[in-house]
Image (tube, rainbow, N blue to C red):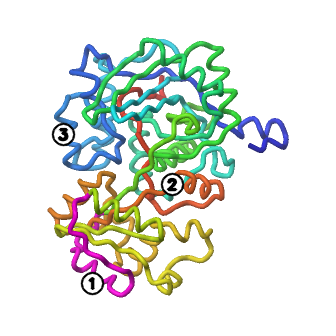
Amino acid sequence: MNTAGHPEATARRGLELTPFRGLRYDPDRVGSLAAVTSPPYDVVVRPDGLHHLQDSDPHNIVRLILPQAPTPHARNEQASDTLRRWLDEGVLTTDPEPGLYVYEQRHDDGMLQRGIIGALRVSDPSDGVVLPHEDVMPHVVADRAALMRATSANLEPLLLTYRGNGSSAATSEIVERVAGRPPLLSTTTEDGYSHRLWSVTDPSDLTRIQAELAEHQALIADGHHRWATYRRLRTEHPSPSPWDYGLVLLVDTARYPLRVRAIHRLLHGLPVADALEAVAGLFRVRRLDVPLSQALEALADAACAGNAFLLAGDGAFHLLDHPDPALLARTIPADRPAAWRTLDATVLHATLLDHVWHIPEDSPAHIAYIHDTAATIAKAERDGGTAVLMHPVREEVVRDLARQGVTMPRKSTSFGPKPASGLVLRALDL
């Protein structure tokens, strides 16, 4: 990246990753490490997934990241009290010395992902060090900020990606070497993913990792709201302070490409029949009486030729494609790059949600964002709503738009695999 300019101005132009003393579960104090982990807070499907995780172990991390109480203040106080109690009881213990952490996720389907967990200096958007690609919802940022203030902790890492030099890079060499050692922890969660964690404390290794990352920028793959929360909390505390940094997982996608999946929409209170009636004459609509796998294949084929969506919730699938060009011209803002104007998420939000269905995108009473395809369909069928199934965006498109400073519509992509929450936490008041 460009490092021209005054040396002091360029010292922080890249990623600044710092070791920290991780908080980790004592395996002897919990039922199992798998039983206390959770997907990231926004992936847990409420209330089904939340109740399941709460019941799996009394110390499951959801009791911290998604505390349950009648009011927001009570929820945050409950999380703070729970964290302090677990620390006092030795359920969570602090690693003896600061380090970075090598984190591995593996699945029987051949997926292998490794990255580095550390405390990353929080930068301003104008610095171009950490690139967001989606807008955030202010009420979610406020909610996460209140929880972090109450607990004084980063409870789960964001997922960031960067493009390194692959296997020839110093960081990759260290990651692969460390992964050959016995891990600090190893567990397999019920989704079939195995997780392993190692600490990196050798000063030479730390220096080499930090020097290499200082030459790179990162894309937020998952955690836009938490990154915005880090930025808000940093401004509330005089620098220097622990709030200058936030917990992240950095993955070199030149070495370990991420999988990109779509995030689907569940439209509450809009029956499929009404949704279809509203788009008549504006999109081509085809009913598909086929299994889900074949319907998704049809969606993928249609998405190659243009904007396409799959509606479900009435026992069948309905493929929407070939939108009316005049409709798009009327509803899509013209002051953005063509790559943005033609995104499925752009057409969904600007054309279908805003103009055709009149659904506010930031109202939980009207719309839910769900990662799991089958769960989205099941909820739509149970509640009488409409599931809008999306086709995923390629990572290159996301990164190119982010480098142009163009954000995508919120919840446009789901990068994965996401780091499990509960394997390592960061306390800011140690």
Rendered position, 138 above or below 182: below
For marks 1 and 3 on the same chain, the one whose residue lies earlier in the sequence: 3
Give the image location of residue 57, x and y in percent: 20, 29
Image location of residue 333, percent across then percent down: 56, 76
> Which residue is under mark 2?
394
Is 165 a magenta residue?
Answer: no
Q: Which marked residue is nearer to the observer: mark 3 or mark 2? A: 2
Q: Earlier in the sequence, mark 2 or mark 1?
A: 1
Q: What element carries label 2?
A: loop
What residue would you read off at disc 3?
52
Percent x, y of residue 19:
56, 23
Within 10 Å of disc 3 (Cα), the crowding (few <14, some 14-19, many 20+) is: few
Instruction: Look at the image and tell me whether residue 285 can be seen.
Output: yes
Spatial CA distance of label 3 from label 2 is 33 Å
* Residue 72 percent location from the top left of the image: 31, 49
Vertically, is 71 above or below 309? above
Amino acid type, residue under disc 1 in the picture: Glu
> Which residue is tagged 1?
277
The secondary element bearing badge 3 is classed as helix
* Segment tinted magenta in the rendering: 266-292
Q: Residue at x 63, y 51 (%)?
A: 125
| Magenta stretch holds residue 287 | yes
Position of residue 320 in the picture relative to residue 231 (left or right): left
> In whole angstroms, how far apart are the C-alphas of marks 1 and 3?
38 Å
Picture quarter with the N terminus: top right
Kind of residue at badge 3? His
Q: What residue type is labelled 2?
A: Arg
Asked if residue 215 lies left or right of residue 160, the reply is right
Q: Residue 374 carries which label?
A: none
Badge 1 density bin: few <14, some 14–19, many ≥20, Cα 10 Å: few
Asked if residue 295 is positioned above or below residue 89 in the image, the reply reads below
